[in-house]
Image (cartoon, rainbow, N blue to C red):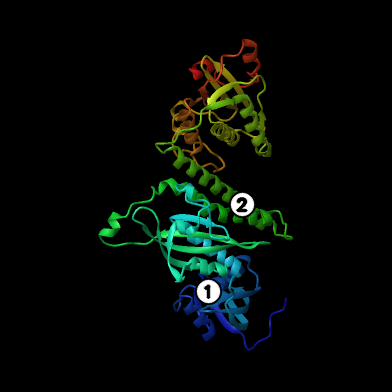
Amino acid sequence: MNAPHGLRPVVGRVDERGRLVEADPPLFRLHQRAGGVPGGMLAVPQLSSVARLARRLGIALSRRVIAAQGDHDIELWVRVRPDSGGTELLITGWQETPATQPPPALEALRWRDFSRATADWIVETDATLRVTHAPSNLPAAVGQPIEALFALSEVADGVSSIAAAAVAAARFEDEEAVFRLGAGIAVRIAGMPLIGEREGFTGYQLLVSRRPVHGDRARRLPDPAPLDEAFGNQLGQAMRGPLDRIIAHADSISARGDGPVRRDYASYAEDIAGAGRHLLALVDDLIDLQTIERADFHPEADRVDLMETAQRAAALLGVRAAGVGVTIDSPSGQPVIALGDVRRVLQVLINLLSNAIRHSPPGGSIWIGCEREGDIVAVIVGDAGEGIGGDDQERIFERFERLGLRDGTGSGLGLYISRRLARAMGGDLGVDSAPGQGARFVFTLPAGEEEPSPSTTSSSRRRPESRAVPASTSSSLS
């Protein structure tokens, strides 16, 4: 690409430390408006990065650069030539244009994401302004008109301000209202119209924040519900949307779906997607943590076939294990029935298998066994990893403990949450291990039926003879 034609180049010089030591007036003014000072570091990031790159490579470079100046963009063509005394800048094609604005849809998404992070409650409506999604502590509001939740200001007789905005499917901010609960809670409402590809306007997402109220009235206002009851729902809504988009775009770049991409850029995108998935997992763990530590948390107590649930967990994680060269030996045999919450039992088993995959060496294998002893049943998950020393076998069940992870993954909450869930269902979770001999996690629950026959029990115990694990299964179940 050829440099654009223009008048005499604007000249500048940057020394070896990156300081702007010489500059024609246009360049010096741009430097000052970017916060630079005479003789200081070149303050225009776009020019500074090109100068650093040219010095590092030791070659002349030409680049098109767009720099911001007030409410305008400045389009430059800069040629950078390193020499023994620093770097020379030759700038041509100096053109000012109005600053490029993001597309309205993208700007709206950004506004929504930032607003959601600060909202106390999130409410969604359909096109008729009836509630389709209510705060977690107000499930009865679903299906009710929005006026059942809020006293809204009116722009005409009987027409609320939100209804007036809905006529044009318009976004609005800082709408004052009162939460209809007890003496009423003063709030501000911001509304993002929900637009379907075919349906057009389908409703609003309303972001509700408390309004500060001063004096005695503020002290008399009742809280509609402890905010921590809705914390998990709000956290998930505020973070999952942005993270999902980051992961999707990063995966697209990594897969080169939109065209060729440099190999190192594709690698960066893969790292970004991995970090996004780690953050999503952390969000899920934090939501679970908030849920299980509530005083009124009580899992269901239904009949659960541990054999079937363990097989399901192994199938769900089989691809992930194969991706790092690890195999999972799925259990087989007669049903082993426990009392517990099937969704939570599956969650514990997935946590244990995920942990075993992270700690297993390439080429290693993980085995799962289901057993019953008296009125206790257990799932045993064993691996051939580095093992766990005696002093660390309780530490791994503490919050945010990430003992021995080589890849930097995991939130340090999985085992803590798993033990809490096991104990909430009347069972327990422990570990039997020694350094260099792998680890065996024993997840126990109350039995849900009479002890099966000895032949049935033996058929469910699948343990490769080559596994080097401590033989203390009976004591682990007691």
Residue 331 locus on image (x, y percent): 65, 24
Q: 237 or 215, which is in the foreground? A: 215
- Numbered tag placed on residue 154 in the rendering: none
Quick one: SS at disc 2? helix
Question: Of 182 and 275, which appears nearest the observer?
Answer: 182
Amino acid under disc 2: Ala
Residue under circle 2?
A: 273
Choose the circle earlier in sequence order: 2 or 1.
1
Residue type at mark 1: give it.
Val
Which residue appears at 34% of the width and 62% of the height? 212
Query: Is residue 171 in view?
Result: no
Residue at the image position 58 percent from the left and 73 percent from the top: 101
Given residues 171 and 12, the one toward you in this image is 171
Mark 2 residue crowding within 10 angstroms, few (<14) / some (14–19) / many (20+): many
> In this figure, which residue is indicated by the disc labeled 1?
44
Number of on-image labels: 2
In the rendered image, residue 359, in percent from the top left (x then y), is placed at 57, 34
Q: Position of residue 153 (x, y in %)?
A: 43, 67
- The answer to whether residue 63 is seen in the rendering is yes
Left or right of 252 in this view: 228: left
Q: Secondary structure at mark 1?
A: loop
